[in-house]
Image: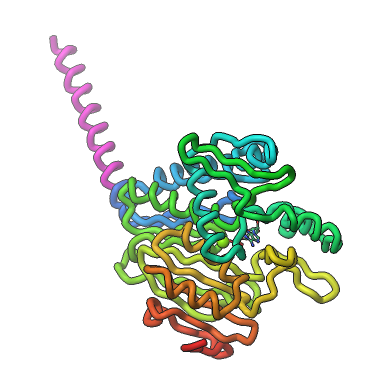
Amino acid sequence: MIRLIQQNVFLGIIIVAIIIAMTTYFINKNAKESEETIVREFYALGTIIRLRVDGKNGEEAIQEAIDRLNVIENKMSVFKEYSEVSMINKNAGISSQEVSTDTYFVIKKAVKYSILSEGTFDPTIRPIVSLWSIGSDKPRIPSKSEIERNLKLVNYEDIILDEKSYSIGLKHANQAIDVGGIAKGYAADEVNKVFKNRKIKSALIDLGGNIYALGAKPDKTLWNVGIQNPFNTRGEYIGVISVKNKSIVTSGNYERYFTKEGKIYHHIIDPKTGYPSESEIISSTIISDHSIDGDGLSTGVYIMGLEKSVKLIQSLKGIDAIFITKNKEVYVTSGIKNNFKITNIEFIYKDNI
Ligand code: ADP
Ligand code: MG
């Protein structure tokens, strides 16, 4: 009898001790998580991705975001042999391919921005992009005849979209789609969705310079995002834009390029010439609610030239831009004037074009 009581007391003490230990663990964990800022850096979609999340559920949210990014990459990368985009390309001139809603949405938007940018943005640029191989370890200057030959294949009007069957095709053999100029924007929007579903109130999503600022900073002030100095190495800014719940996407000549005999060959190709764009704009930043819009537009307006680009952005509701020219002039559209400050005095603020 006495032994039984002793055993029960002993068991009781152990149970109480376990309960205390577990409660302390969870209190500490919660306290730590709510103060914690989690930053994760990794490589995906051909670029360095940096996710910064504040508050509870950060770890789980980041993991889910990484999974989502991998799904998007597997569907849209032209470097994956069996991605949906690769399948469309393999069957160019033969048949349309049924694709997921992700890929359909991105290519449909890409066509929309091709029309808006008067074909300066063109997702069928792939045959030219692969000639140059910029960003690979073997970039090269193609011959004039190679460019002429492949330029004939570039035409976004040859993309066949069928909304009923969710299928996409290309009219002619050897045509190929490249969503490299727009997919990161979509991916940023999807990470934003994942975070919002997980009740994250504050995060900074950076997909290789394609940025989405979710909410405000944990201290409730606006996020400050630096606009890269296109004449300098990464990390130096010409100015700062302060925002919350906005996408900030920049296309710049400094992102991917190679130099040959003193000349820079960058990765934004003018579909009219087949050569890197030579407009006076060397950096175009789009500020918008959705990153896919910012990404789709930033590449096209970079090529379009200043006058047309400013007009186009001003005509689009809820979309703003910062353009930097070869002469170090900075043009800012009216919607963000009060949120943007030049911090490098070499650059001159221009009100009008
Ligand atoms: P980044 O990928 O550096 O963020 P962009 O969004 O401007 O920059 O996309 C550039 C990429 O888009 C290129 O690497 C290429 O794959 C593709 N591209 C190049 N020129 C064009 C173009 N005129 N229209 C559509 N896509 C393009
Ligand atoms: Mg883009």
Q: Residue at x 18, y 18 (%)?
A: 8
**Predominant secondary structure, magenta span:** helix
Near-viewer residue (329 or 108): 108
50 sits to left or right of 201: right
- Residue 343 in sight in this render: yes
Q: Residue at x 66, y 70 (%)?
A: 254
Residue 181 position by quadrant: bottom right
Establish if 334 lies above or below 26: below
Near-viewer residue (274 or 69): 274
Please check the rendered image and state whether residue 9 is part of the magenta-colored stretch, yes or no: yes
Q: Residue at x 37, y 50 (%)?
A: 195
Near-viewer residue (85 or 75): 85
- Residue 206 % position (x, y): 50, 59
- Residue 305 % position (x, y): 60, 76
20 sits to left or right of 263: left
258 sits to left or right of 160: right
Residue 217 position by quadrant: bottom left
Stretch of the chain drawn in magenta: 1-28
- Residue 262 % position (x, y): 82, 76
Q: Residue at x 79, y 74 (%)?
A: 263
